[in-house]
Image (cartoon, helix red, strand yellow):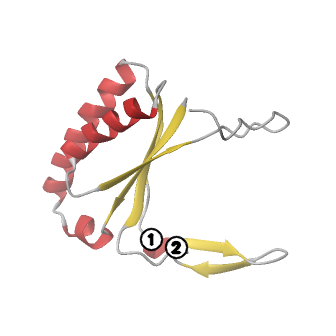
Amino acid sequence: MLYAILAYHEEEVVESWTKEEDAALMDELLQVNDRLVEEKHLGPAARLGSTQRAVTLRGKGDGMVIDGPFAETKEQLLGFYVVDFPTLEEAVAAARDLRKANPTAVYEIRPISLFIPGAPLASSDEG
């Protein structure tokens, strides 16, 4: 089963880190990434850019582009991992490893289904 591990943090805190602090954190996270790759559990992962440069498309028809993220929250979605584990508990364990490297972050673990045009979506009762 595929799970998304969504990494949330206060963007201002992350942007306040020195290059050295950020590099040290990324080194720790990459150790977890490397292990998950070696175990064939890690799919795509990305570190998202600043919400200051984000836009949201919403509304009817062609929609309207609005500056910034849609949600007004204290923490912003700063990155995500796609992992493949048989159970939610194993995906949570992987998120705990990421949290050990970045203990001030919040991680949301959510089942995902791949969208393949023309293929039926997985049922919501999986997992």
| Labels 2 & 1 near each other (Cβ < 8 A) | yes
Tell me if residue 87 comes above or below residue 38 in the rendering: below
Q: Which residue is mark 1?
A: 51
- How many residues crowd around disc 1 within 10 Å: few (fewer than 14), some, or many (20 or more)? some
First in residue order: circle 2 vs circle 1: 1
Give the amino acid at mark 2. Answer: Pro
| C-alpha distance separating marks 2 and 1 | 6 Å
Q: Say which element carries label 1.
A: helix
Residue at the top extreme of this rendering: 39
Q: Which residue is mark 2?
A: 69
**Percent x, y of residue 91:** 40, 34
- Pick whichever, 123 or 6, lies toward us: 123
Please give the name of the residue rendered at 61% of the width and 73% of the height, measured from the top-left corner: 56
Compared across the picture, whether 55 is left or right of 75 comes to: right
Tell me if residue 58 comes above or below residue 84 in the rendering: below
- Of marks 2 and 1, the one in the foreground: 2
The numbered disc on residue 121 is: none
- Pick whichever, 3 or 87, lies toward us: 87
Q: Split into 4 quadrants, where in the image is the C terminus?
A: top right
Task: Using the rendered view, name the quadrant where residue 55 is placed.
Answer: bottom right
Please give the name of the residue rendered at 27% of the width and 33% of the height, measured from the top-left corner: 32
Task: Using the rendered view, name the quadrant where residue 10 is placed.
Answer: bottom left
Please give the name of the residue rendered at 41% of the width and 67% of the height, measured from the top-left corner: 50
Task: Using the rendered view, name the quadrant where residue 105 is placed.
Answer: bottom left
